[in-house]
Image: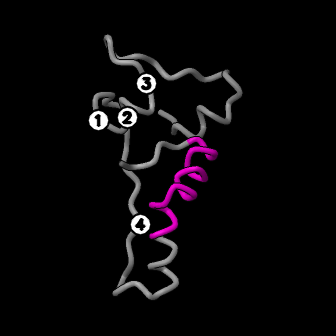
Amino acid sequence: MTSHAEIGKSGGRIKPLSLGEIAPSAGNVQNKTYALTRDSFLVTKAAPSSAVTRFLEFVRSAAGEKVIVANGAVPAK
């Protein structure tokens, strides 16, 4: 098993598989129709500092989502 990012970096050598009739699309990953996914978590040990809070806000922003997609992952919705 590999990650969505590794599939993207493979230059087409690795292709995600459809599961039955379910295509491995970003939409199907986001709506949890495509079953071969895994979540990523950002966890802090204590209450987040203002810098961490700003970073988390960036990750959830449109600009942050562009970075996530550019690196081969599917942003949370």
Determine the secondary structure under disc 1.
Answer: loop
Q: Write down the residue under mark 2.
A: 29
Which percent across, then down, holds residue 26? 44, 33
Q: Is residue 76 left or right of residue 9?
A: left
- How far is mark 3 from mark 1, CA to CA? 10 Å
Residue type (three-letter) at the residue carrying disc 4: Leu
Residue 60, how many percent across, how many down? 45, 60
Q: Amino acid at mark 3?
A: Pro
In the figure, 10 relative to 20: above or below? below
- Mark 2 element type: helix
Asked if the stretch drawn in magenta spans residue 58, the answer is yes
Q: Label 1 belongs to which residue?
A: 32
Residue on which disc 3 sits: 24
Which amino acid is tagged 1? Lys
Tell me the CA gap for discs 1 and 4.
20 Å
At x 51% / y 39%, what residue is drawn?
A: 3
Q: Quadrant of residue 38?
A: top left
**Mark with earlier residue (1, 4):** 1
Residue 42: which numbered mark, if any?
4
Identity of the residue drawn at 34% across and 87% down: 47
